[in-house]
Image (spheres, grey):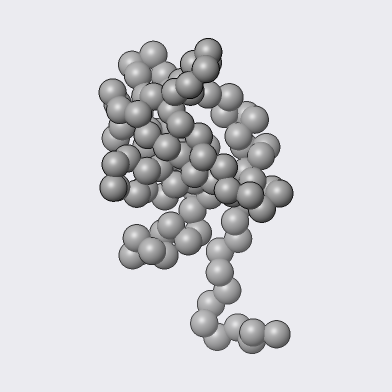
Amino acid sequence: MRLAEELSTARFIIRKHSELQGCESIGQLKQALMANCMGDSVTVHYTRTTGLIATLFVDVTAHGVIESYGQQPPVDWEAIELQALHIEAPADDHSPLF
């Protein structure tokens, strides 16, 4: 799957410098962060159920994923799961437009 297609259907997008990675679930997001972003500060973008795009700034450490600012609490994955819009896969090219 091409990157543009992957990102268009991803519920979450990790931005690490200029690199982008799409994730479809919280589990996949947590796994990707721990595997690919250890020791880095990254952003996670997702669309809330309200339609607004949220940006979460996180630091990935050996102790887990924490918010980058404020009190730096561990990321509340359950809250993010409830806030994140579930994205449906686009219809195939043979579907009627109306």
| Quadrant in the picture for residue 14 | top left
State whether residue 88 is above or below residue 96: above
> Is there any visible trace of residue 85 in the rendered image?
no
Which residue is found at the position 53% from the left and 49% from the top?
11
What x and y, as percent, mark residue 24? 50, 48
For this view, does 26 lie left or right of residue 20? Answer: right
| Quadrant holding the N terminus | bottom left
Image height check: is 74 above or below 44? above
- Depth check: 18 or 75 in front? 18
From the top left corner, tell me how far across and down residue 57 is, in percent: 46, 31
- Which image quadrant: the C terminus? bottom right
Residue 38 visible to an observer of this rendering: yes
Left-right relation of 23 to 35: right
Tell me what residue is drawn at x 37 percent, y 34 percent.
42
Of 32 and 69, nearer the camera is 69
Q: Is residue 8 above or below residue 95?
A: above
The quadrant holding residue 37 is top left
